[in-house]
Amino acid sequence: MHAGSCELKVALLDVDAFYVSVELLRRPELCGKPVVVSGTGPRAVVTTASYEARRFGVGSAIPASRARRLCPEAIFLPPDFPTYRAISKTLMEVLKAHVERVEVVSLDEAYLDLEGFISPRAAMRRVLAEIQRETGLTCSVGIGPNKLVAKVASDAEKPRGFVTLTREQACARFASAPPRLLPGIGPKTAETLAKLGLETIAALAAASPELLRSRFGPTQSLEIARRARFEHGGAVTPVREVVSESRERTFDIDVADAQVLREELARMASELCTSLARHRRSGRTIGIKVRLDDFSTATRARTIAEPTRDVETVTSVALRLLREYDPPRPVRLLGVRVGGFGSAGGGAVAGRPERAEALQDDPQLALPL
Ligand SMILES: [Mg+2]
């Protein structure tokens, strides 16, 4: 049975085994073999495994050493992020050429707003054909009335999945699946739910609100129950690309002491680099911002050869800029910025699973979707 077109408002498109698929395009002799993309160090983890390797239990985020034991004949390849980013760019260009509102989730995954399409399914078939033509990649697609249904549907029949579901159909189809299938319900929540005897999505959907509230509090309990009913109100939001990140501080009392300014700048640079590392971002442009006690504001920036998030590099460049500017009056506000993301070396970093990126790239949602 097909869902009615008016119910099909959102699609989630996800490239099948993205990193591995890119590698197979340039090494077709490896097609049909268990192939794993992973780092090489002692603590490396699998970023992506081919479907042949997944049959041996090799999946994203498991240690590469364990993957070798599970599947000794697997071919291990190092990740090549510059190539993955270039292909991702082509992929997203195709999506944006067909669909007005595209929410990029990760290098190989995006939500598409299908409202306004007379035939959303036909539109998605056209998109898939063009992606295959332009990149050689295959994708899985889920289509539904909201992002939650689209996301779960896209995962249901990989690879080359094409699943359209109304909300009611999603409830029926995943009734006996564990709550962990739902984005935002992680291992800890699932464990708590299991202790309450709620081990399926249907059981969770039917659970008493009081029971859930007693364990999860008023806000989270409502959200969990809504997800179990496949309700989700989030719109497809084209995310503005993040190009820089900064830290700044307005002093309680204007500061004239150069030593205090240097210490504060170094502290903020360190905090900024910690955050850049957490979001796996690097940039080539390091800048400072100085607002004086008369509210005049000066910015200074320097672009270096290689993207960085190294605290020593950022701090030393920022301090040099401050020394060169040499504030002529007491300072009201001081800031440091790293920008020019997206150049080589920015974005994803070796040894990280594709999946983790998708979840961490959406800081607005407490329960990621
Ligand atoms: Mg994928």
Image: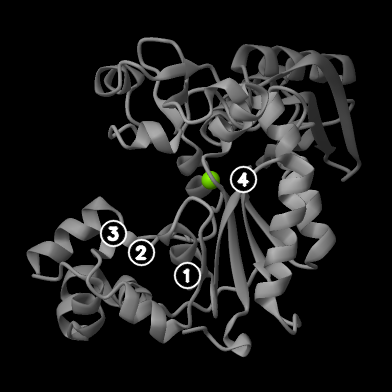
Tag 3: Cα neighbours inside 10 Å, few (<14), some, or many (≥20)?
A: some
Q: Which mark is residue 180?
A: 3
Q: How far apart are the alpha carbons under marks 1 and 3?
A: 13 Å
Residue 5 in sight: yes
Q: Are marks 1 and 2 in contact (CB under 8 Å)?
A: yes
Q: Secondary structure at mark 4?
A: loop
Q: Mark 3: which amino acid?
A: Arg
Give amino acid for label 2: Leu
Please report whichever mark, 1 or 2, sits nearer to the chain's N-terminal start.
Answer: 1
Mark 2 element type: loop
3 and 4 marks in contact (CB < 8 Å): no
Q: Which one is in front, 269 or 60?
A: 60
Contact between marks 3 and 2 (CB within 8 A): the answer is yes
Location of mark 1 (residue): 148
Of the pair 57 and 207, the residue shown nearer to us: 57
Q: Nearer the viewer, mark 1 or mark 4?
A: 4
* Residue pointed to by mark 4: 108
- Mark 1–mark 3 CB contact (< 8 Å): no
Q: Amino acid at mark 1?
A: Leu
Give me the C-alpha separation between circle 3 and circle 2.
5 Å
Do the residues bearing badges 4 and 2 touch, measured as CB atoms within 8 Å?
no
Q: Position of residue 282 (x, y in %)?
A: 67, 27
**Residue bearing mark 2:** 182
Above or below for 95 versus 224 = above
- Give the vertical position of 182 relative to 87 (above or below): below
- Between the C-alphas of marks 4 and 2, the distance is 20 Å
Q: Residue 324's image quarter? A: top right
Q: Earlier in the sequence, mark 1 or mark 3?
A: 1
